[in-house]
Every structure is written in C-alpha cells, then in structure tokens.
C-alpha cells in the first residue's frame, strides 16, 4: 500500500506531461477530435468558415492587445485573425476573468505548459493564427496573453457580448 500512492501519483503526473510543454509550434488540432464543439461559459468553438464577422487582433511586446475592447452580438460567430507584431511569443486566450486568472497562475507554476484548445491562439513572433468562436451568452468576457508575466503586465482585453 505504501508504494501504491506514489505510483498512482507518478502515473497521474506523467499522464499530464504532454499538456505541460508549451512550445512555439503551431497547434493544428485545436482541441482534440476534429469537428468537436467545445462549450464554455463564454460560448462555443466554431467553424471559421461560418463566421459572420472577422476581427483582427494585434499583439505587441508592449504587453497590449489592439484593439483592447470588442463588442459582439450574442449568437455571433467571430473569426479572430491574431497577429503577433512582437519579437516574443504571445497568445490570445478567451475566457472569463476567473478562468484567465486561474490559467495564468498555472502557467506561472508550469511555464512549459502546452495546450491546444479552440479558444486559444498561440502565435510566434511575426506570425498570424486564426481562431473562431460563437458567443452564445451575453455578458463581459476577456482575452489575455497567459505567457508568464504578460497577463500580469496588463496584456488583457475585454469582450462585451450584447
């Protein structure tokens, strides 16, 4: 029994090892099973081809997004074209403020974390990535760069869904 608990802990740790390697490589699958819809409190994943609107977002080494505030209609499907104008890795992660803060804390504890979710765009310097999202609920939601130190430096924007 004394060896069982450490063995289970090790097995659990290694089962998540792939999720903790945050690299510069493009993340092709965007959330696992192709075509799978991911539901979150701020909406759901969408097919970029079905977007009713395209919004360009620029990320800069000044730790700011441009634009820093967006307004969308409830039910609207948005294709985000996310460009990294800086010289360091940046990402755009959609979520509630609570989710972003929790995830930022995880990123601080595990800076090599890799994630491949449809509400995230990881963008190498000088590159552009696309993500599509349908905003199904009204309210205030956010987007942030959760690379350690970036979110804390103010790299966060607001999305108002009416």
Image (tube, rainbow, N blue to C red):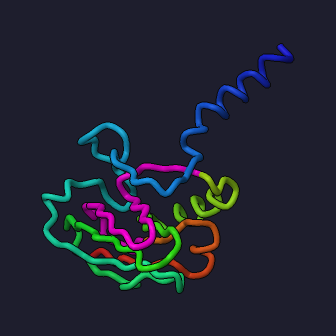
Q: 5 or 151: nearer the eye?
A: 151
Residue 17, horizontal then vertical, whole percent: 60, 38
Q: Residue at x 19, y 67 (%)?
A: 76
Left-right relation of 29 to 145? left
User: In the picture, which quadrant includes the N terminus?
Assistant: top right
Residue furthest to the top: 1
The span shown in magenta is: 113-142
Left-right relation of 129 to 101? left
Q: Residue at x 54, y 43 (%)?
A: 19
Q: Residue at x 50, y 70 (%)?
A: 145
Quick check: 133 above or below 9? below
Q: Quadrant of residue 6?
A: top right
Left-right relation of 98 to 95? right
Residue 138, magenta (yes or no): yes
Q: Quadrant of residue 33?
A: top left
User: In the picture, which quadrant includes the C terminus?
Assistant: bottom left
Q: Quadrant of residue 13?
A: top right
Q: Residue at x 37, y 45 (%)?
A: 31
Residue 117, horizontal then vertical, whole percent: 40, 51
């Amino acid at each position: 029994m004394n060896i069982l608990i450490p063995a289970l802990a090790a097995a659990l740790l290694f089962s998540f090892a792939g999720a903790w390697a945050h690299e510069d490589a493009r993340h092709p699958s965007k959330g696992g099973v192709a075509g799978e819809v991911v539901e979150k409190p701020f909406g759901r994943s969408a097919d970029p081809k079905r977007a009713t609107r395209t919004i360009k977002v620029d990320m800069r080494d000044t730790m700011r997004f441009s634009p820093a505030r967006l307004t969308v209609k409830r039910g609207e499907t948005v294709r985000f074209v996310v460009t990294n104008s800086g010289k360091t890795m940046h990402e755009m992660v959609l979520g509630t403020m609570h989710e972003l803060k929790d995830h930022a804390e995880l990123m601080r504890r595990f800076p090599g974390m890799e994630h491949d979710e449809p509400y995230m765009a990881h963008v190498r310097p000088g590159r552009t990535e696309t993500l599509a999202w349908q905003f199904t609920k009204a309210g205030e939601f956010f987007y942030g760069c959760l690379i350690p130190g970036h979110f804390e430096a103010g790299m966060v924007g607001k999305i108002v869904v009416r």
